């Protein structure tokens, strides 16, 4: 990523900076690759998006849906990606798994670190209904994984304890709230994808709530800093950050705080919005 951005900067510099990117704050001519990474957000974003869509996406989706059932790294680690019955996944499902990683990533990568089922699935694995298992394993639905539980109802590495097999968590629909004892690809009530173990739902609510509350706190600090700088600019009669940009940051701050706190107390509208972005509005 850094190498591609550096190359883009060198090409732009060699041509005399014909591409002038915009910035939320005052634009500065990038005199180095570091300044390019710091100030030219649109250029960096376009480069990042191009790499993700043109290189990373085909690499993951094609290899995970191939007969090898995994990327080169997975093959080296002797693990593979399967559906819930141990079969090779389709390209469409591999595509879904790749883009569902957005949900795991926006949780400050916690979606990769926390397992949400007895099969040690991440969030994107649960949503795509796939498993990552050892190549040599004789497949069963629980593939010899220990049942684990925690006080948060989802598996936290190093903190979870083995379950005694008692109790039932069940399944819950994120969209309509329907509860049932058996898992399905879609909710038996509303027919939408998002019918997951209750522990998964609770874990995602807690994670989303904490992350968005943290983001809201950071934006509150940024708002205070930008407003202070703008007041100084006004006193010195010089151009500063536009008030429209300050308003946008303030609205984002308040929205994140409201979303985070509501998710922590159990409201699902933030989680539904995140899934709608990741999965689309279809049923």
Image (cartoon, rainbow, N blue to C red):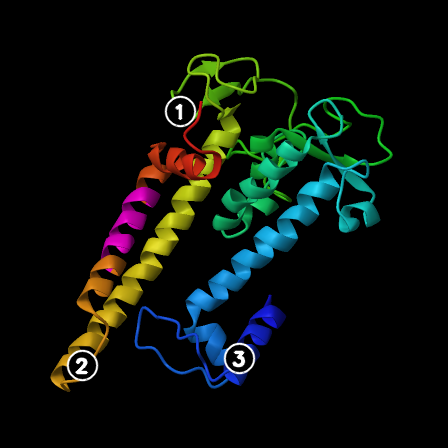
Q: Nearer the viewer, residue 7 or 35?
A: 7
Residues tagged 2 and 3 counted as in contact (Cβ below 8 A): no
Front-lying residue, 60 or 179: 60
Q: Are marks 2 and 1 in contact (CB under 8 Å)?
A: no
Q: Which residues are magenta?
A: 250-260
Dot 1: what SS?
loop
Q: Residue at x 81, y 39 (%)?
A: 68
Mark 2, residue position: 232
Tag of residue 33: 3
Q: Which residue is mark 1?
A: 175
- Report helix, strand or loop for mark 3: helix
Residue 26 location (% of width, % of height): 30, 77
In the rendered image, residue 22, in percent from the top left (x then y), is placed at 35, 70
Frontmost residue, 177 versus 58: 58
Q: Residues within 10 Å of mark 1 (few under 14, many from 20)?
A: some
Residue at the image point whose x is 20% and y is 75% from the top: 230
């Amino acid at each position: 990523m850094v190498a591609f951005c550096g190359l883009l900067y060198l090409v732009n510099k060699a041509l005399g900076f014909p591409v002038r990117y915009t910035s939320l704050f005052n634009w500065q001519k990038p005199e180095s690759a570091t300044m390019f990474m710091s100030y030219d957000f649109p250029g960096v974003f376009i480069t990042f998006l191009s790499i993700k869509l043109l290189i990373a996406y085909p690499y993951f989706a094609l290899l995970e849906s191939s007969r090898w059932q995994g990327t080169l790294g997975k093959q080296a680690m002797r693990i593979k990606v399967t559906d819930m019955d141990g079969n090779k996944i389709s390209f469409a499902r591999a595509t879904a798994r790749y883009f569902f990683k957005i949900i795991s990533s926006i949780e400050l990568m916690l979606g990769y670190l926390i397992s949400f089922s007895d099969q040690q699935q991440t969030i994107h694995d649960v949503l795509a209904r796939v498993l990552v298992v050892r190549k040599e394993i004789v497949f069963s639905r629980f593939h010899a994984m220990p049942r684990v539980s925690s006080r948060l109802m989802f598996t936290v590495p190093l903190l979870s304890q083995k379950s005694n097999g008692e109790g039932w968590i069940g399944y819950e629909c994120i969209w309509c709230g329907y509860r049932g004892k058996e898992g399905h690809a879609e909710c038996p009530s509303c027919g939408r994808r998002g019918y997951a173990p209750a522990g998964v739902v609770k874990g995602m609510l807690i994670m989303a709530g904490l992350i968005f509350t943290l983001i809201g706190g950071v934006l509150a600090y940024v708002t205070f800093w930008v407003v202070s700088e703008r007041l100084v600019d006004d006193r010195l009669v010089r151009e500063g950050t536009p008030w429209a940009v300050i308003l946008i940051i303030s609205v984002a701050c308040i929205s994140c705080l409201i979303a985070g706190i509501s998710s922590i107390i159990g409201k699902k509208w933030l989680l539904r919005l995140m899934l709608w972005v990741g999965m689309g509005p279809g049923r």
